[in-house]
Image: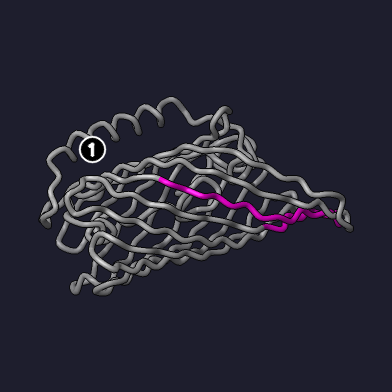
């Protein structure tokens, strides 16, 4: 079961582009070293497996039984950033995840335009994305704002945005999701860090259906100094209370995901440099970055 119980497969075009990007970056990573790089281009490819479990109780208005679900997922992403001016950078994202043994999948493409302060401590930007995911059929898109604040051993990342239906039922039913999220990284060494995130969103349709949610999670990642690959484990969860226009019925529950995976960075000398150079992601709760949303 995916974030919104979506049953729409990703387009063949997205899968083809993602596979090509991964192959290109993996080849470039063959000569990766541990020394810092002044390259204006940086990025990574990532792959993971995940186990999901959740429960939901239906109330009308009293409890009418609890349902549970479990599934395995696989997914991956590719991200690259380039410095286009002394204080400006562009980042491009591709990502996808799917349930094992079914056609349920979601993912998207995104772009970020970021201004960096002269001290290289603060950064402000805008982003947009297109993808598949949600209750309804059709394409959805995201637009939002984001900012980072970095210290010697830590990094804060905040993002706020709006997801909206663009085609088919997602558009005709007015599917929307306003969200805000904050994540924090702490680096014990340049190649070992932990992170945590918390967020909130409110999904709505023009029928009056609505679902406020809270999200939270944590992650640990480590890269041996002589290795071109880093390894991570993560946990993400959200709770929800979905109500239905003019009825007293509602659904309430919690969904949890446990991840294990790896990343191959390029153009950087450490995980801390990677997070600084190409550490942005679309965190929208409908089809965005699975690990950090």
- The residue indicated by pointer 1 is 25
Q: Residue at x 24, y 74 (%)?
A: 152
Rendered location of residue 238, percent (x, y): 60, 57
**268 in the magenta segment:** no
Hey, which quadrant is residue 213 in on the image? bottom right
The residue stretch that appears in magenta: 240-260
Q: Is residue 84 visible?
A: no
Looking at the picture, tell me which residue is in the foreground, 99 or 204: 99
Looking at the picture, tell me which residue is in the foreground, 22 or 132: 22
Residue 30 versus residue 148 in the image, above or below? above
Rendered location of residue 45, percent (x, y): 30, 42
Residue 199 versus residue 84 in the image, above or below? below
Q: Secondary structure at mark 1?
A: helix
Rendered location of residue 39, percent (x, y): 12, 52
Q: Residue at x 84, y 49 (%)?
A: 65
- In the rendered image, the quadrant that contains the N terminus is top right
Q: Is residue 6 visible?
A: yes
What colour scheme does the image use? one colour
58 with respect to 205 (left or right): right
Q: Residues within 10 Å of mark 1 (few under 14, many from 20)?
A: some
How many numbered dots are placed on residues in this image? 1
Residue 197 versus residue 96 in the image, above or below? below
Looking at the picture, tell me which residue is in the foreground, 258 or 111: 258
75 with respect to 247 (left or right): left
Rendered location of residue 246, percent (x, y): 84, 55
* Magenta: main secondary structure: strand
Q: Residue at x 16, y 58 (%)?
A: 85
């Amino acid at each position: 079961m995916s974030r919104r119980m979506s049953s729409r497969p990703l387009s063949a075009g997205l899968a083809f582009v993602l596979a090509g990007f991964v192959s290109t970056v993996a080849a470039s990573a063959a000569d990766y070293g541990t020394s810092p790089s002044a390259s204006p281009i940086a990025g990574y490819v990532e792959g993971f497996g995940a186990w999901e479990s959740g429960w939901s109780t239906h109330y009308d208005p009293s409890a009418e039984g609890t349902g549970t679900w479990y599934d395995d997922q696989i997914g991956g992403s590719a991200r690259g950033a380039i410095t286009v001016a002394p204080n400006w950078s562009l980042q491009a994202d591709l990502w996808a995840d799917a349930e094992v043994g079914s056609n349920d999948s979601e993912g998207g493409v995104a772009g970020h335009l970021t201004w960096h302060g002269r001290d290289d401590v603060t950064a402000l930007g805008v982003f947009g994305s297109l993808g598949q995911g949600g209750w309804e059929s059709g394409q959805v898109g995201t637009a939002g704002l984001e900012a980072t604040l970095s210290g010697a051993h830590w990094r804060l990342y905040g993002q706020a945005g709006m997801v909206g239906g663009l085609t088919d039922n997602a558009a005709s039913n007015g599917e929307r999701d306003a969200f805000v999220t904050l994540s924090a990284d702490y680096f014990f060494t340049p190649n070992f860090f932990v992170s945590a995130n918390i967020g909130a969103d409110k999904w709505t349709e023009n029928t009056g259906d609505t679902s406020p949610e809270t999200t939270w999670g944590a992650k640990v990642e480590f890269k041996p100094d002589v290795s071109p690959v880093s390894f991570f484990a993560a946990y993400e969860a959200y709770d929800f209370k979905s109500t239905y226009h003019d009825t007293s019925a509602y659904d309430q529950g919690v969904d949890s995901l446990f991840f294990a995976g790896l990343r191959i960075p390029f153009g950087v000398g450490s995980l801390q440099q990677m997070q600084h150079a190409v550490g942005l992601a679309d965190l929208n709760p409908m089809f965005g970055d699975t690990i950090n949303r």
